Amino acid sequence: MENLIHVSDQLIAGVTLKYSRYLSNQINWDNRLIGIKGARGTGKTTLVLQWLKKEGLPSHKRVYFSLDELYFTQNDLMDTINEFYQNGGKIVVLDEVHKYPGWSMVIKNLYDRYQDLKIIFTGSSIIDISRQESDLSRRSLMYELKGLSFREFLSFEHDLNYDPFSLQKILNQSDNIREVFPNDFRPYEYFDEYLRFGYYPFYQEDRVGHYQRINQLIRTIVEYDMAEIKGFDIRQAKKMLQLLAIISKQVPFKPNLKSLAEKSGIHRNSISNYLIYLEEARLISLRYQEGISIAGLQKPEKIFLDNTTILNALSRANPDKGAMREVFFNNQLSVVHRVNHGKHVDFVVDEELYFEVGGKNKGNSQLPTGEKAWVVKDQLEYPVGKSLPLWLFGFLY
């Protein structure tokens, strides 16, 4: 226990408070049980360590435990936290909970036993707490941390700090958007940089080997994290990687499930589930036809890779520009809005807003008349009438 406390102290002391993620301001930190899930590499550990540091409590009152520590392969988590609580502990952060068998039951028992103990846990985006052997959904507040938005990237990388915009502000007050930025702000000076590697915060650690790290991240998710999904056969991991490689060469595209099954070697009866697994792991994004309310029962109308960093990594930094634009738009909008594939346009947002995405010469002939519809253009600096700049949709969170 003493060594665990020492490691916790070192990690908390070492984390910087210079930048914080969008989610830190959305979490109700007063709640007694908080869950934060997210894809690998999005910054969950940094987020919780920053919060612990801001709390400023002494070591015996707050602690950070990573459950992939070797210590917990030989020591009982319940006993460890019992000891921490008896010595005055008030806050415990459990990182990577999906690495510990029976984690949800331990957390439930701790929550019920100690009314003055705050528990914060983090885990893979794959986690569905309602499916665990102990349902925590009625007790905890759950949040999901996404990767960096373009707005956050400007702050992290270039110390350019701006507040997020609501979608309604972008659509209804687009003429005033220019006033928010200084005259010398040129968004496309930074935008390509973001598209290439800016989604995962760890890009700062190694830009040269970043795409190799992304590919390693993908393998780890498929070969290890997906073992947590009920019904997933880990023996299919190699075929899943092959399926992802096939998708990466075609996105965004309308899937032919029979063809995907044949090319990947995955049984046709399983291919739909495996696409959902890849989406739960935040490696791809499935979009359904507008008007579909129960997406899981329908064939996806279009498949995207989850974000532009993955697209660059899998395409060896040579992605199709059209694919890049649509992946970015889909990725940034879907954090805060419901996104569907449109019958006559690229995207329908919240079932009433229509968007066509393209290059700077994209026209508006495809926009439905009499509808709330816009053209989203790459290389357009600021809004012009019904034409909106692509980069601006990176300011939604």
Image (cartoon, helix red, strand yellow):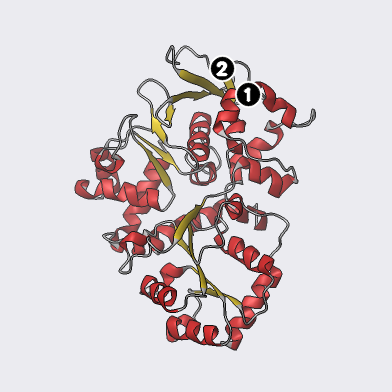
Give left or right: position of 336 versus 164: left
Q: Which mark is residue 386?
A: 2
Q: Position of residue 380 (x, y in %)?
A: 64, 23
Considering only order in the chain, which callout, 2 or 1, is on the residue closer to the N terminus?
A: 1
Q: Position of residue 45 (x, y in %)?
A: 57, 64
Label 2 CA crowd tier, 10 Å (few <14, some 14–19, many 20+): few
The image quadrant that residue 76 belongs to is bottom left
User: Circle 1 sits on which residue?
Assistant: 174
Return the residue nearer the eye: 391 or 274. 391
Give left or right: position of 302 versus 170: left
Camera-near label (1 vs 2) is 1
Q: Position of residue 324 (x, y in %)?
A: 52, 34
Query: Furthest-front residue in view?
Result: 115
Task: Look at 66% across and 24% down and name the residue there.
Answer: 382
Question: Can I make out residue 209 in this image?
Answer: no
Task: Look at 32% across and 33% down and name the residue there.
Answer: 301
Label 1 CA crowd tier, 10 Å (few <14, some 14–19, many 20+): some
**Amino acid type shown at disc 1:** Ser
**Amino acid type shown at disc 2:** Lys
As measured in the structure, the alpha-carbon distance from the residue carrying label 1 to the one carrying label 2 is: 9 Å
Which quarter of the rendered picture does the N terminus lie within? Answer: bottom right
Which quarter of the rendered picture does the C terminus lie within? Answer: top right
